[in-house]
Amino acid sequence: MKILNIGNLKITLPIIQGGMGVGVSLSGLASAVANEGGVGVISAAGLGLIYRDASKSFLESSIFGIKEEIRKTREKTSGFVGVNIMVAMSNFVDMVKTSIAEKVDIIFSGAGLPLELPGYLKSDSTTKLVPIVSSARAAKLICEKWYTQYNYLPDAIVVEGPKAGGHLGFKPEQIEDEHYSLEHLVPEVVAEVKVFEEKYNQKIPVIAAGGIYTGEDIYNIMKLGASGVQLGTLFVTTNECDASDIFKQTYLDAKKEDIEIIKSPVGMPGRAIMNGFLTKVREGKKIPLQCPFKCIKTCDISSSPYCIITALINAVKGNFTGGYAFAGSNAFRATTITSVKETIKNLVREFNEKQKSHSTH
């Protein structure tokens, strides 16, 4: 596998561990991936709940939480550390400013267009900015807007296809449409980005995400022009993943038909492992009480059947009567819990085997 360059960062293993909230990817998983030469990513989603003892205010405990997780990760690794901050989060700006002040290596930002992101950098900031998009059009819009307004181009772009876990940037009818598949999107984004690369003489690597599960998948998508990949689901079933053992077990127990598209309270489709909680939601049996956190801008408690952040934190702790697990389309392929080291070793081996067989044909 080739080195992935994001700005002046030389990432020896071109693998980014996807940021998974709430509490699935924190310092444990992020540091383990960073130690193997990839980029470990802390999810900023829901940190105010995970660190609720730090302050009565969700926003204040979120800031405390992000600082704490970055600090803990840095204690365990000298590798590259990123933070995933969703644009849809009501405390997006706080989380971005704090992460930049803490000198995190990279901010990954999706779930909306992070059009103002470069505006939070200071003259001495070292943090790289990587938007997550689901179309070439979005990539173009961000490049144009950032350059015009801030004289800044993305340090890399993640393009996430419809096989990803969690919230998806697609309409329900696009999810199974092959024109929106990752294999279609990557060349489109690469071509769009190339225009900016040539015009401004700056490299913008494209990183492919959503449904990548094996070394062969990595090889195939890189053949289409991706410079790196982002994987989430595969890392859930590792010892170092920050979720509870019960949460990991739901991945091991899941069959292909259990992984479904659900309608999330935040107004986007999401991919999750079906369970009793979600069945009750479908049957209209879940009634929300109140919204204590106002964590997502687009979440409307008046029409929402449950509080998503509570459901996700319940699941990560192992309480599935009160929650559920988001998962990528390949989650059912997990058969055992292994270490991050072993997982990455397998990916590299599969990649090399595919490369070898390809060069002999």
Image (spheres, grey):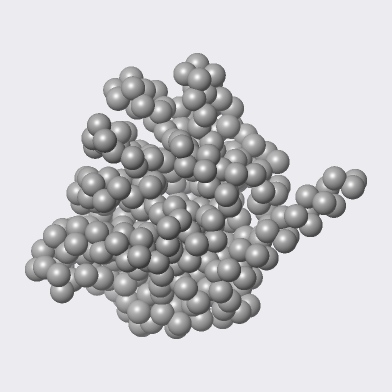
Horizontal side, residue 38 vs residue 81: left or right: right
From this viewpoint, is residue 325 visible? Answer: no
Image point (47%, 42%), residue name = 9
Image point (50%, 32%), residue name = 204
Horizontal side, residue 97 vs residue 322: left or right: left
Foreground pick, 209 / 63: 63
Residue 306 location (% of width, % of height):
28, 68
Residue 127 location (% of width, % of height):
34, 42
Image point (58%, 76%), residue name = 338
Horizontal side, residue 3 vs residue 299: left or right: right
Foreground pick, 128 / 293: 128
Q: Residue furthest top?
A: 199
Image point (62%, 60%), residue name = 213
Quarter of the image for residue 122 reads top left
Q: How many marks?
A: 0
Q: Residue furthest right?
A: 361
From this viewpoint, is residue 347 visible? Answer: yes
Residue 88 location (% of width, % of height):
29, 48
Quarter of the image for residue 315 reads bottom left
